[in-house]
Image: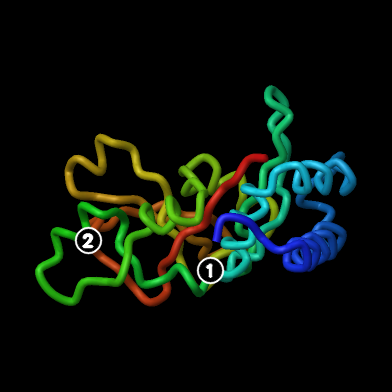
Amino acid sequence: MNQLSKETAQELINTLEKRFLKFTTRHPNIDWESVKEKLQNNPSKLLTIYKMEETGGEPDVIGKDEVTQEIIFADCVAESPKGRRSVCYDHEALESRKQYKPENSAVHMAEEIGIELMDEEQYHAFQQLGEFDLKTSSWIKTPVAIRAKGGALFGDRRFGRVFTYHNGAESYYGVRGFRGILKI
């Protein structure tokens, strides 16, 4: 599928509008009409948001890039998206597993969906918008130096604060997925 039907696109826009209006603290000083216009003028990005929604991400606007004027969407579901869990970090990690391989990797799934993994700074800023990953964790974009040594980063919120941890990139857990960022 390379484009949504008019009906599906309108249903998605309606869902996004309801979420946008319900969680206004996530995007102060951004009006729905400007978001809607960007969505309607970018069918490929709307398709990406549809994929975010279909995998359980509950995408919502979390800000605006002041330089490019792009609207920033992120997965705002309370726990790591259900349709993106039990994955290792990247393709290299997936290939390195000798047995009990997960079906996919976070980096590959993000590429398929058309989003970027949140990096550590984005994840911490995102956590200021609400309390996310209280029972789950999310892979976050890992610096090359850490990944070169076989590691990968993930984050969660426990005990009232946000943590960043490390794990072997080939590890995977039923409660670890990933969150993405999309700019329109």
| Residue annotated with mark 1 | 81
SS for dot 1:
loop
> Which corner quadrant holds the N terminus?
bottom right
| N-term-proximal mark, 1 vs 2 | 1
Foreground pick, 139 / 106: 106
| Residue annotated with mark 2 | 94
Residue depicted at 78% across the width and 48% down the height = 40
- Left or right of 126? Residue 142 is left
Q: Callout 1, which amino acid?
A: Pro
Q: Position of residue 119 (x, y in %)?
A: 47, 43
Q: Position of residue 135 (x, y in %)?
A: 51, 74
Mark 2 crowdedness (10 Å alpha carbons): few <14, some 14-19, many ≥20: many
In the picture, residue 49 is in which quadrant?
bottom right
Residue depicted at 87% across the width and 48% down the height = 32
Residue depicted at 32% across the width and 65% down the height = 104
Q: CA distance from mark 1 to mark 2?
A: 20 Å
Q: Which numbered disc covers residue 167? A: none
Q: Tally the marks.
A: 2
Q: Position of residue 3 (x, y in %)?
A: 63, 56
Q: Is residue 46 above or below residue 55?
A: above
In the picture, residue 21 is in which quadrant?
bottom right
Q: Callout 2, which amino acid?
A: Leu
Q: How is the image coloured?
A: rainbow
Foreground pick, 78 / 12: 12
SS for dot 2:
helix
